[in-house]
Amino acid sequence: MLSNLDGVVPMDDPHLGHHLGVWRPIPLAWADDEANPELRTLDEIKRRQPDYFFSDRFRDVWAPALKSLIVARFEAQLEARPSSSGSGGILVVKEPGSQAAELLLSLFPDSRLIFLLRDGRDVVDSWLDGYSNGSWALAEGAFPIRDDGRLAFVRWQSSVWRYRTAAVRAAFDRHPAAHRVLVRYERLLDDPARELRHICARFGLRTGGDQLPRIGNANAFERLPPASKGNGRQARSAQPGGWRSNLTLEEQEAMLAIIGPMLAELGYLDAGERERVLRHCSRSNVRAAG
């Protein structure tokens, strides 16, 4: 929606974070429950080893070079798609590999950060749909999951959401207050113009008249062509809470065990759900002590 503003050039999913924040261990979802391995990135594990390419010891060499590479690539995008005003424009990057948020923001401390936060249960449910027969995500490297692999996949995606959310929260907290804004998906869905206005006011983006309501209305889920939305499509339902009917009770419990505490911190759980999380944490502590 921001790309509809004059002078804004979008970059949709450059995947820098996936190249710089490689998951280790990759088969976490299939690990022994009792082993409970911690999801981390290769950079997090290797950064203190001098022979690692992105080693902390040689950061003063590779960090400026990496920044120059990114800047050159982004400038090429701006030059290839100049803004309608002809002034070069502002580049708005949507980065899905947000586990590398700390590294990227350390390279660009003057950049603006939009933290788009969504209920992790809906995120996991969305990815479960993406890894299904006929899904849009198959062309992006996904694959159909067998029924006996669903539970492992739910655990994996729950761990990924927890890690990414924690990483972006930490980077967000360290970023200057004037250079950051938190947007909840659910509030954006409820009133796009309100959230767009908040972003634009914070970052000094120019808008006029009823431009923001028109942009919000033009992107409304109900206005999309029927063939472009629904299960297996990128625009799937725009209805929070679908995980309740799409995930089995066993899958829901496995998901809540991993992301429940963070959901509670972020205000996504009602009183009954918070009680379930507390009971599960208590049982886990007893098992760990035993």
Image (spheres, helix red, strand yellow):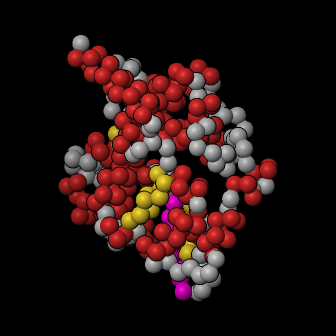
Residue at x-position 38% and y-position 52%: 168
Picture coordinates of residue 270 (x, y %)? 45, 37
Residue at the far front in the pictured view: 271
Picture coordinates of residue 78 (x, y %)? 54, 76
Q: Nearer the viewer, residue 83 or 175?
A: 175
Instruction: Look at the magenta stretch and give its main secondary structure.
Output: strand
Residue at x-position 58% and y-position 24%: 248
Picture coordinates of residue 175 (x, y %)? 31, 63
For residue 115, what is the image quadrant? bottom left
Q: Nearer the viewer, residue 274 or 134?
A: 274
> Magenta region: which residues?
87-94
**Quarter of the rendering occupied by the C terminus:** top left
- As for residue 17 lying within the magenta part, the answer is no
For residue 179, what is the image quadrant? bottom left
Name the side, left or right, on which 66 lies relative to 193: left
State whether residue 25 is above or below residue 104. Answer: above
Instruction: Say whether residue 80 is visible.
Output: no
State whether residue 23 is above or below residue 228. Answer: above
Residue at the far bottom in the pictured view: 86
